[in-house]
Amino acid sequence: MRTVFYLALLLASILFSSCNSEPTLQKYFVESSEKKDFIALDVSPSIINIDKTKLTAEQKTALGSFDKMNILAFKLDEKNKTQYDAESQKVTQILKNEKYQELMKVGSGKDAASVSFVGDENHINEFILFAKKKENGFAVVRILGNDMNPNNILNMISLIKSSNIDIEQLKPLQGLIK
C-alpha cells in the first residue's frame, strides 16, 4: 500500500513539474489568433512553387527541413495604440526567455526587427522573426522545421528568390502592408 502511495506521489510531482506556466510564442499565437486586431496565418511549404526535379541535393535538404510558417500580425490603427504597445511588449518579454537565442537585432524603439532561433546552431527547430513598424503594427513569423541549420536557411532564401511564390497563401496580410 505504501509503495502505491509513493508511486502516486511521484507521478503527481512529475505531472505538475512538467506543466510549464511560462509564456511561449506558441501559447501567444494560440491566445492571440482569435483577437480582432490580429491576423493569424499558417503557410505551408507549397508556397515555394518550384520544380523539385531541378533542385540540388543541398536545396532538397533545405526544402525538406522546412515544415511550415506561422505568421501573427497586429494591425495598428488609431483606436488600438495602447493595446499595440502592450502586445508588442508581451512578445518582447517572451523572446527574452533563454529558450529563444537572438541572432541579430536591427533598429530600435518604434521600428525594429530581430531574428531568434530555438535549438542549437546545427539543429534549429524554429526561427523567429519579430518586426514592428510604428505606422503598421508588428508581425511575428515562426519558421518551423526539423534540424534546420544556417546553410539550409541560406538555401531556402535562394529558393524563395527563384521560385514562383504562391501569393494566395499570403492574401490575408494584404491589408497590413501599406
Image (spheres, rainbow, N blue to C red):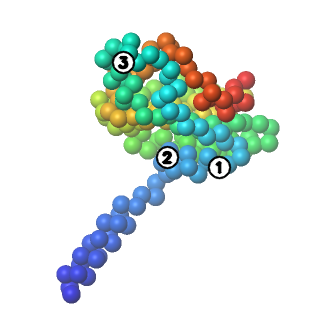
Quarter location, residue 87: top right
- Number of numbered labels in the structure image: 3
Real-space Cα separation, disc 1 to disc 2, in angstroms? 14 Å
Residue nearest the observer in this picture, 3 or 174: 174
Quarter location, residue 139: top right
**Residue ID for mark 2:** 26
166 sits to left or right of 155: right
Residue 82, horizontal then vertical, whole percent: 72, 44
Disc with the residue nearer the chain's start (2 vs 3):
2
Real-space Cα separation, disc 3 to disc 1, in angstroms? 36 Å
Disc with the residue nearer the chain's start (1 vs 2):
2
Disc nearest the viewer among 2 and 3 = 3
**Residue ID for mark 3:** 59
Q: Badge 1, how many Cα within 10 Å: few under 14, some, many 20+? A: few
Classify mark 3: helix, strand or loop: helix
Which residue is at a point 55% across and 28% down the rendered structure image?
Answer: 113
Residue nearest the observer in this picture, 62 or 176: 62
Classify mark 1: helix, strand or loop: loop
**Residue ID for mark 1:** 34
Residue nearest the observer in this picture, 56 or 27: 56
Quarter location, residue 19: bottom left
136 sits to left or right of 147: right
Real-space Cα separation, disc 2 to disc 3, in angstroms? 28 Å
Which residue is at a point 41% across and 30% down the rendered structure image?
Answer: 66
Residue 11, horizontal then vertical, whole percent: 29, 71
